[in-house]
Amino acid sequence: MKRRNFIYLTGVGAGAMMLPNLPSFGTPIDPAEALKQVDTRIKKELADAALNTAKSKGASYADVRIGRYLNQAVITRERRVLNVGNSESYGVGVRVLVNGCWGFAATNDVTKDGMAKVANRAVAVAKANARISTKPVELAPQQGYGEVSWKTPIEKNAFEVPIKEKVDLLLACNGAALTGGATFVNSSILAINEQKYFASTDGSYIDQDIHRLYPNFTVTKTDPATNSFESRAALSVPCGMGYEYLTPSESEKVHGIVTRYKQRYDMLEDIKNATKNTTEKITAKSVEPGKYDLVLDPSHLWLTIHESVAHPTELDRVLGYEANYAGTSFLTLDKLHSGNFHFGSKNMNVVADKLQAGSLGAVGYDDEGVKCGQWDLVKDGVLVNFQAIRDQAHILGLDHSQGCCYAQTWSDVQFQRMPNVSLQPGKTPLSVDEMIKGVEKGIYIVGNGSFSIDQQRYNFQFGGQLFYEIKNGKIIGMLNDVAYQATNQEFWNSLVAVCDKRDYRLGGAFNDGKGQPSQSNAVSHGSATSRFNGVNVINTKRRIG
């Protein structure tokens, strides 16, 4: 399967609207080939060949990324298999700093001769850039770590699981949906393994083995009487885990009006519930527009956090260097430096974290050899920091990078990408049921849906998958055609309560697009169920005139 097809198929669901176009990438392989590893000793020798060449040609700094990227997709529809794809991409990217300018080149000729050639090309690019540059790169200092390694803490490598086992699970899910009356159903399991080796003239040789998994489905029912249809996607979480995520566990279930999941996922149970939900949605009452108190489940809120907090706090958007995929940011350096810009209410505490277990963005080191960590972005409602990499740190007055550098593949130059960005749970014990009991007129929203946001990420609109009407502290039925609108600050300042850590869960984007040429990044966003008061709700079905 080519990467273009893989990315397209992985985009079925939340990710698709974020990444419309990527270059074709990857070579089909036998699944058994995916289990073979490249010897670290060989990768170090190759990396040294590139680094030594770059230094001999005048580079003041150089880094090398030797990357092996494995993708697997198993895709089904109704009672048949649509596609099974295993692909591999292996190559090297070299970045150099010469005369204060970056140069980058990449090759799939992973030999010592190939390394020397690609390093030469990177130096030539840097020298050409230097002739038109007006301001030299300022690179935050970074210590060398020597030879170190990091691996996603998985229990079961998804690439070791037989294809038949995955197909059997997906067809069983599809069968359950069809038995329940579904008109259409598709399902998939996507697995990624990034084997990344980073070396730099700082003295780091970093070997990382990163795993991600994304099971997903969409169930659709039609109503011949009204010619209408309704769908519901999986409430699964794309995650930085192994195949153990698909091992159901009762203790990892969040029971309520619909079952949601934490670190283990019951795909068969979820698709049965989804099939029932589509029937309920067809007959659900259309929402009456107006002001409502919103109770937002983490399966929904992650996308709002992603678009309205995570992207606006990217320093390159703040500076106007990045404007692809919904523009720049309403945030500015002045707002940060004021020390009193109230992004949200005092209940809003948002943390950037590259280490969170089970998250899509968890790595030990970023793509310029910075050891990863966590830091506050919003504390007690006040904006306190942005996201930066080595050549941006000085803009924030930092003497170190925050470790936000990432490249989609070995052939792409690394640049600033968001870490996991999450709303912290409340410190006061509060359950979802207790939160709902306090709501007189509200809507409980589960699952992410459509979204729209302006070019400064200030005015936005979000839909969802399941909407439940709350009246006098009780859920009284399902609603339909719901979307809420707000400005960014208005919305986050309406945050009046967040459930405690017992309800904290991750959501995430498997393919978050950014840059030009486009690159994809996987990132998670956590929260507990949260309440926002007096938010404007519209009816998406009504027409003007």
Image (cartoon, rainbow, N blue to C red):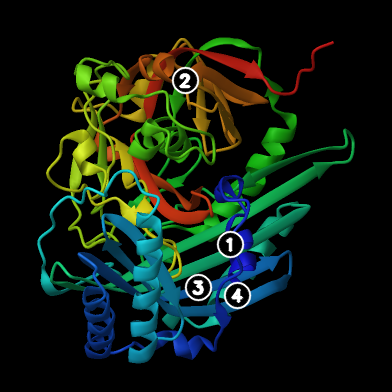
How far, Cα to Cα, is label 3 from label 2? 38 Å
**Amino acid on which the number 4 mark rests in the picture:** Val
How far, Cα to Cα, is label 1 from label 2? 33 Å
Mark 1 neighbour class, 10 Å CA radius: few under 14, some 14 to 19, many 20 or more: many
Mark 4 neighbour class, 10 Å CA radius: few under 14, some 14 to 19, many 20 or more: many
Element type where label 2 sits in the image: strand
Element type where label 1 sits in the image: helix
The vertical placement of 96 against 456, above or below, is below
**Amino acid on which the number 1 mark rests in the picture:** Ile
| Mark positioned earlier in the residue sequence (3 or 2) | 3
Residue under the image location 26 percent in, 41 percent down = 352
The answer to whether one can see residue 13 in this image is yes
User: What residue would you read off at disc 2?
Assistant: 294
Residue under the image location 27 percent in, 61 percent down = 97
User: What residue would you read off at disc 1?
Assistant: 7
Element type where label 3 sits in the image: strand
How far, Cα to Cα, is label 2 from label 4? 39 Å
| Mark positioned earlier in the residue sequence (1 or 2) | 1
User: What residue would you read off at disc 3?
Assistant: 71
Query: Which dot marks residue 167?
Result: 4
- 325 or 121: nearer the eye? 121
Tell me the quarter of the picture where residue 425 sits. top left
1 vs 2, front mark = 1
